[in-house]
Image: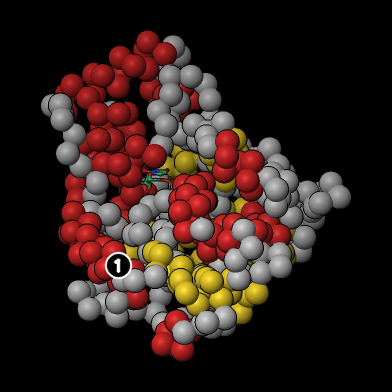
Amino acid sequence: MKYNYLVVGSGLYGATFAQRAHAAGKSVLVIDKRPHIAGNVYTERVEGINVHKYGAHIFHTNNKTVWNYLNQFAEFNRFTNSPVANYKGELYSLPFNMYTFNKMWGVTTPEEAAAKIEEQRKASGITNPRNLEEQAISLVGTDIYQKLIKGYTEKQWGRDCKDLPSFIIKRLPVRLTFDNNYFNALYQGIPVGGYTKMVENMLDGVEVRLGVDYLEYKAELDKLAETVVYTGPIDAYFGYKLGYLEYRSVRFETELFDKPNFQGNAAVNYTDRETPWTRIIEHKWFEFGKDEQGNDLPKTVISREYSSEWKPGDEPYYPVNDEKNSALYAEYKKLADAEKNVVFGGRLAEYKYYDMDQIVAEALKKCLVAN
Ligand code: UDP
């Protein structure tokens, strides 16, 4: 056997694992079926703008180990995510905070906002939230649920809010302060020069082969290494033999404009049910509209995001962690646990709605154990 590790997938999980294993003196081969590294954090430069080709990725974490680890490979800028919600032309601040409550209800103090939420929660009769709808209403009341959550969530997940798990909405902070920072994280930013450059630095000195489909050549590839680190979909690994897990896929319509400013913000969410896209990303604002020399960029690139149910051949993005799929995943997990010399890691192999920092933390942990 030629390698200690065959890492399948060069996204953040694979790149972290490969980097650590290589640094520990192990021989590592990374393969990826795409023609580029970096998985879904891949960025591509267009007119000086780092375009997030597989959707917006804003790095944020409270984990100092992860933050320090990644800072070896990239300098992070001070970008703070503050998306704007557009509900039929009315603009609201996100996440839900005093600016949102003021615009929605005219309230000006935290007490008034809390009272308004409490009044709406009481009127709904919800005491023990059992799904996303009930969780949302008990957190922010019915008005915000109707205007800023229901439509967006149903477009994003293709399911009724009553059929979705409540943890999804708990990703969003609710604050009685004037703070538009979308994340409750100590550290936040975008790697200067794009994510691709960061992953390139992580994989420095590691052998990488692109355009190689692991599952197509599994038997031959498995012979190359003692241990396989698999980061693709877990159901695909097992030939879907227990059935298909459900994923949400995303289609991006990307447009270049010969003007400097399209929407004045990196992310605008369209929270009504009728607009077919969920959000529009204007990529240059992740880097303040400037190139690496600090010059203003004259053009702009935007991506409209359309969410759809995954079908074979599409790219999977989001696992659908409802009861049915969680039960099926548990069955696949048993098969995975019985698989010798294979590590299953990352959003697709663990069927989990991980954020980037959690992925890096998991890979760092796993690599310590493995080595
Ligand atoms: N969400 C919403 N309205 C918004 C933004 C988010 O209702 O304007 C809900 C929606 O259900 C979404 C979830 O919050 O799936 C998590 O949003 P997040 O921004 O964390 O999603 P991601 O950026 O991972 O797509």
User: Type of residue at label 1?
Assistant: Ala
Task: Label 1, secondary structure: give it.
Answer: helix
The reply, left or right, for residue 363 in relation to residue 209 is left
- Check the image and report above or below for 310 versus 140: below
Q: Residues within 10 Å of mark 1 (few under 14, many from 20)?
A: some
In x, y percent, where is residue 92? 47, 34
Q: Is residue 54 visible?
A: no
Pinpoint residue 282: horizontal percent, then vertical percent.
62, 53
The residue lying at 25 percent from left, 29 percent from top is 138
Q: Which residue is mark 1?
A: 336
Q: Is residue 193 left or right of residue 243?
A: right
Q: Is residue 236 above or below residue 110?
A: below
Disc 1 within 8 angstroms of ligand 1 (CB): no
Asked if residue 60 lies left or right of residue 85, the reply is right
Residue that appears at 18% across and 21% down? 122
Q: Position of residue 126 (x, y in %)?
A: 15, 29
